Every structure is written in structure tokens, then in C-alpha cells.
Amino acid sequence: MRFMIAAAVAALALPGTAGAARYAVGVAPGADARTMARALEARTGGRAAVIGPFAVELRARSVRQVAGLRGVTYVERLSAQRRVAFVPSDPFFATRQWYIPAVRGFDAWILRPPTWLSATRVAIIDSGIDGDHPEFKGGRIVAANTFVGGSAYKDVQGHGTFVAGLIAARIDGSGMAGLAFPAQLLIAKVVRPDGAVPLDAEARAIRWAVDKGARVINLSLGGIRNPFDPTGDGFSPVEADAVAYAVRHGVVVVAAVGNSDQAPDQPWRYASYPAALPHVLGVSAQAKDGSVPMFSNRDAIYNDVAAPGDELFSTLPRSLTSERPTCLEQGYSDCGPQEFRRPQGTSFATAIVTAGAALVRSTWPELRAEQVVAMLERTAVDQTAATGCRRCSEGRDPLTGWGRLDIASAVDWTKEQPRRDRYEPNDDAGARAKVLARRRPTIRATIDFWDDANDVYAVHLKRGQRLRLRLFGENGDEIALVVWRPGTRRLGDIRYPSSRWVARSEVPGSHDRLRFRARRAGSYYVQVKMTEPGTGIYTLRLIR
């Protein structure tokens, strides 16, 4: 299918020489559109203007000398017959898929053909997939594996196939349209026939997906988090280690904050695991009217973005829809069991955000995972009473995090790119800390109250050796320094009392100094902790 240049661009016509024609010139990601406009004018003698971060309008007599210009990805003559935006011709798009316009899923493709986008491998760790479904033909599934027996290409529950359709159903003029059209699927089956997800199966599936080249992992599953009842808290070191493995390998991990149907109260004010793990993009659900349903878990820290999660439409295994043989839409949720005819859940909202992450990764393949996550979060549309969420407050809130996903704004990011942090992930003591081998290292790194509140560095000291620390926060953020004893494995583990620290800030601030003498030899852990909401950059100097 051909992707069109907007007719609205005609309003941007430039003065130029007689007989000049109008062209759209594509600008490669990483190139500067303003610089490109000047280069085009110098080459052609025409006039150029920036019409987006990835396109320049050029009015010139000829563009023969443009094709070889570095950073040019396409040259297309503009005409009045262009459509305003890309609209899939798949019939269910117009009648069922209200959620795609709600997150501006295809609005980014007004000026940029999707043939620019690099293929992105997306792992769906779920109940499997209907491998023979027409929506996933043509090489859509590049690998599949089961970690609970049976076949990954068979989906008894239907949940995995529904998620896969939201993310990557083919855009081919029939059926429905998946949001992430450059996606290549990795399918990992981790749900047993009884609906349970063994933690070891999930962990092995995450590692398998990473080793298969996944760039985004969708985890539409979770375990209850209850900070005030350790016996009912679902934290798993096995799961956390697997997620950390994915993060270390540069994968964007997207997970549901959870549905409160199994929580002690509804709504539940804590995100489930693995959404409540560092660097995981936690997703909550919204209804059509912009409200947040009672089933969607809240969380002041780990709920990052919201997406449609009510009255959705997607694919289902035809073995399930065949139970209603008179239904005409076989293979789709309207013909499925009752729970899929008006489906709701943070699981499905997560799939929509996963698709958005895949599109950003395809557009900006050189960016690190934390940069992609920051782009998705910081372009989200703040949700308030004016948008239909009466319980949402201005700014980041526990119901919707940064706000509703806006795919077009994330893809068309125009600000300075979020900073890289080469020390990540270093979120805890033990094996997850970054080892500092140099005697007097100077570290410049990022910290984020919601996604990355702790940075931990391991420093080996001899008995009696002194260590001096100097911290400088560039944005005036409230940051604390803590030094932990050798042998500490998890900073938040209730088995380790607070007496395990050997030095700490008296009052957190943007500037701090600590010094102490090691009473015994070993690896001490230096924790840099953001104590108040914010995002910043800090410099840490260690002298030993």
C-alpha cells in the first residue's frame, strides 16, 4: 500500500522561480532538517522550508542533483491529489478500532513513508498464538517457543493471539490493522492450560526472547504487589533477574500495572510485578471516555503511561470463534467467548504501548532503550478532568502516569534527545551494581525518581582505607548518598536492617560530601538515590 504526502502541505508553498515544482524531501533520522534545507537550496538554487523533523519542502526547477545528497531518504513530487493522512483500508479499522486514532497511531505517517522504518523484533510472552491466522501470515512470526509444553502456535486461552493482533496484525486491506506494521513477532508461550504462568517459564522466555534479538518485550501479565504484607507480595528474584537481563541488553520492557480483580481492594493502589521493577514501562488502562476504570491498578511511581484498555477489538484463535459458527467474523474477538466481545484490561493497553515502542524503535534505531522509554513518557498527553479523567490531577498522577500514549508525538520527537546513561542498569547492590575499578573515577550519569531512582556502584576497599565522595546534582534535585557494607545483596530486602549502611547523607540535596574509613576489606556499595520527584543529571567523584 502506498503512503501519501499530505495535501495540507500545499498551504506551505514557497516563493520561487517561475516553473518550479514542489517536492517533499525525506530527512534521515539523526540528520538535521534545517541543515538539509540549506543544503538543498545550495544544490538546486530553489527555496526550501522545514515541514517536520523528517521532511523538507523544496520548490525547484530540478531535483536531479538531490538524490545523492547525504541524509536524503526520498524525493517525491507533491500534488493536490494526495490524501491528508495514511488510513488503512482494512475494513475493521474504521468500524472497530477506535483505539488507534485515540493514541494517534498512524498520524505520524503524513509525511514519512513507512518503508523507511527498520524491522523491529517484538516478543509477546503470553499464551501462544494461532499460527495459522491470516493476520500473521507472510513472515510476521519469525520464531516461536513454548516453555510450558504443547505448541507455541496453538493458543487455548486466546489472550496471546488478542495481544498479537493489537500489535502486529497485517495491514493488507482485509480484516484489522495492527499498530506496529514494522514488527516481527517472537512468540513465547508461558501460560499453562489452567491459566497459570510459572515464574521459571516466564524468566526463561524473557531470556530466550533477548537472545533471539527482541528489541521490545510485551509482558501482559503480573503478580500482585503489596508493600505492607510481605506474605502477599508477588516479588520474584527470578523474574527480576530476567527483566534485568533484558534491560542490560537494551530491550524496552513493557508490562501491565495489573487488574485489581485479585487484589485486596479495588481499585488497588500498587502496580503489579514486573511493572514495578526498575526500567520497566508500566501501563494502565483508559476507557473510551477518558476515564480510568476501577479495575486498572494505580501507582504513584510505577504507573508510567495509559492507553485504551476497554471495549477493544482484535484477533482470536479460530478454534475459539468456531464455537459460534453462525458469527460472520471468524478469527476476531466479536465472535469469541463472552469475555472477548467487550474485552477490557491493562493487558491490552500494554499491547498498544508495546506497538508504540516498536514504532519509535523502528524510527530511531540508534537510540538506547531508556531513551525510547523517555520519549514515550514525555510525549504522553496529560490526563485531567478536561480529557474525561475526573480523578486525574495535572501533571503525573497515580492513575495515568505521564498521561495517555501519543504515538505520533513520540515518533516525531523534535526536542533534544534524552540523555544516554552508559552505567545502566545499576539499580541494586550485589551483582547488579556497576563495578568501579579505577582508583579515582568521576561519573556523570542520569537519575529519575520514577524509572531509575537508584544508581549503585561497587567499590573495593582494603581494611583501613579511606573513601571520599563528592556529589553534584546539576538540576538542584534532592539526592541522597548512602554507602552499604560488603555482603549487601538487595537494598530493599527486609532481611537487611538499616544498620547495614556505614555512611549516609544527613540531609539530601543537590550537593553532598561523605567520607569514611573501611573497617574491613571488601566491596562497598555506593548508592545515589533521588528522594523527591524529578529527573536529573549528577556528577559523582570518588577518591580512595
Image (tube, helix red, strand yellow):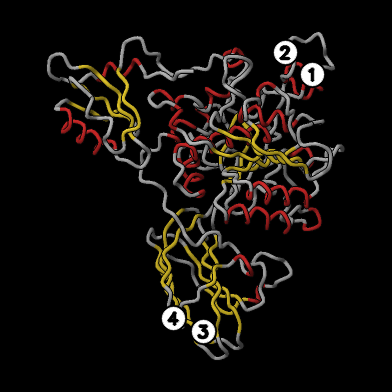
Kindly report which numbered mark, 4 or 1, lies closer to the viewer in this rendering: 1
- Residue 516 shows which numbered tag? 3
Residue at (76, 16) in percent of width and height: 335
Q: Is residue 292 visible?
A: no
Q: Position of residue 24 (x, y in %)?
A: 30, 24
Kindly report which numbered mark, 4 or 3, lies closer to the viewer in this rendering: 4
Task: Measure the C-alpha gap from mark 4 to mark 3.
Answer: 11 Å
> In the depicted view, which residue is nearer to us: 335 or 101?
335
Task: Measure the C-alpha gap from mark 2 to mark 1.
Answer: 8 Å
Residue at (57, 73) in percent of width and height: 525
Residue at (45, 28) in percent of width and height: 115
Which label's residue is closer to the chain start, 3 or 1?
A: 1
Say few, some or many: other residues with alpha carbon within 10 Å of mark 3 (under 14 / 14 to 19 / 20 or more): some
- The quadrant in which residue 75 appears is top left
Which label's residue is closer to the chain start, 4 or 1?
A: 1
Residue at (48, 34) in percent of width and height: 381
| Residue under pointer 1 | 321
| Residue under pointer 2 | 329
Q: Examine the rendered structure and indicate whether residue 468 appears above or below residue 52.
A: below
Task: Measure the C-alpha gap from mark 3 to mark 1.
Answer: 67 Å
| Residue under pointer 4 | 543
> Which amino acid does the dot numbered 2 rest on?
Glu
| Left or right: 33 in relation to 110 | left
Task: Measure the C-alpha gap from mark 4 to mark 1.
Answer: 66 Å
Which label's residue is closer to the chain start, 3 or 2?
A: 2
Say few, some or many: other residues with alpha carbon within 10 Å of mark 2 (under 14 / 14 to 19 / 20 or more): some
> Which amino acid does the dot numbered 1 rest on?
Thr
